[in-house]
Image (spheres, rainbow, N blue to C red):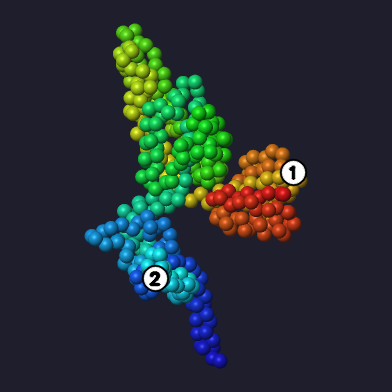
Amino acid sequence: MSRLLRRGFIACAILLFAVASWAITVEVVGSGPTKQAAINNALRAAIEQALGTFVQSNTRVNMGRLDYDRIITASAGYINNYTVVAEGRDPIENVYKVKLRVSVNDYKLKEDFFEQFKRDPRRQKAFVKGRLDSKRVVVLYAKRTHNSLPYETMPVKEVIDRIEDKLAGYGFRVFLPEQLARIKTRATELAIDEETAIQIARQEDGDVVVLVDVQAGKRPTPDGFYIIYATVSLKAFDVTTGELFANVVRRGKTIARGGSYGLEEGAARAVEKVAPKAVDNLVKKIVSRLSTSHEKFVVFIFRDVPQDVQLQLQELFANQLGWDFRIARQYGSYMEVEVFSENDPTSANLAFWRAIRKAGIPLTQVELKGSRIVYSGE
């Protein structure tokens, strides 16, 4: 075989390998009045799934048609091949349904899509929102002093409603005390410390927990009026790490004739003046936090692990894995380790699992939620 021919075979092999590495395989279901219509809809679903929330959050009606149909319907250029896994007519819905296994040219698809994205600032803004639509924010009321108003009062509702509306506008999934039925009493009627709030949010698979406190009071003036004041305090914690990354405090006041305003009504007026800026400031910090990559922050949690094994794990992090880390919390058989790694949580977990397997350390993975990875020694 000539040298030129061998080089040609090698080049083809490299090209085939590269194309294969750019492809992703997805399983999708489509339905329609005919088999071909069902297949077309399934291929569209495959394209949407490959682009994920980007397409879903950016799709909008423009001049009577979907703005991104050009990319989605031009599926022939992005789909390598597909296989019909199952098909048949649904007797209840009276439509034809197919299940396809589709190989999508992920590289070409996203390259074309992001070329449009880079040229359009509106899509860039929508992309930030799209990245947040699966993020969960738990909002809890936490009384801090004897001046803190009850949860059901107007000023508190004013602040929490504003937070919910603002977060929902960015596409966040917001969970309020009323929605967290099993913790309602603890969340709305008792003073919650920060650690308890973070634990509650972790139970709800939250990404951020917001603690709200509204304090109010009044004092008389020499000329027979009352000065009524209110303080709005908003704190936001990263549920994965427990880090406080937003602490917003705003104070407002109003004046009223003696006896013409109760404390709640006056505080509501004072809160109305300061709540918009306070909530805007808080939400901007949350958006910035969750739309910026923090993947280097991975938290390993070890439960029921003897202290001698904990020492082994610290040595493993430092030497075998070579990661920068710090012990965030450690007591008895419990240890939390914050790892600073450029790896995403899944890759970091795989590297860790290989390391403990090689070292013969008997641990069982319990869960992986976001950047939190939990192992048990039992």
User: Looking at the picture, does residue 169 appear above or below residue 185?
Assistant: below
Q: Are marks 2 and 1 in contact (CB under 8 Å)?
A: no
Residue lying farthest to the right in this orientation: 308
Name the residue rendered at 37%, 67% in the picture.
Answer: 94
User: Looking at the picture, does residue 76 appear above or below residue 5?
Assistant: above
Residue located beneath label 2 in the image: 96
| Closest to the observer, 293 or 373 | 373
Q: For mark 2, give the secondary structure.
A: strand
Residue located beneath label 1 in the image: 307
* Quadrant for the N terminus in the image: bottom right
Residue lying farthest to the bottom in this orientation: 1
- The image quadrant of residue 284 is top left
Which mark's residue is nearer the viewer, 2 or 1?
Answer: 2
Q: Residues within 10 Å of mark 1 (few under 14, many from 20)?
A: some
Residue lying farthest to the top in this orientation: 222
* Residue 261 can be seen, yes or no: yes
x, y percent for residue 46: 42, 66
Question: Which amino acid is tagged 1?
Answer: Gln
Question: Which amino acid is tagged 2?
Answer: Tyr
Q: For mark 1, give the secondary structure.
A: helix
Q: Residues within 10 Å of mark 2 (few under 14, many from 20)?
A: many
x, y percent for residue 246: 46, 37
x, y percent for residue 109: 40, 67
Is residue 308 left or right of 36 when viewed as pictured? Answer: right
Q: Earlier in the sequence, mark 2 or mark 1?
A: 2
Name the residue rendered at 53%, 38% in the picture.
Answer: 182
Is residue 229 left or right of 20 when viewed as pictured? Answer: left
Q: Distance between the residues labelled 2 and 1?
A: 60 Å
Name the residue rendered at 41%, 71% in the picture.
Answer: 89
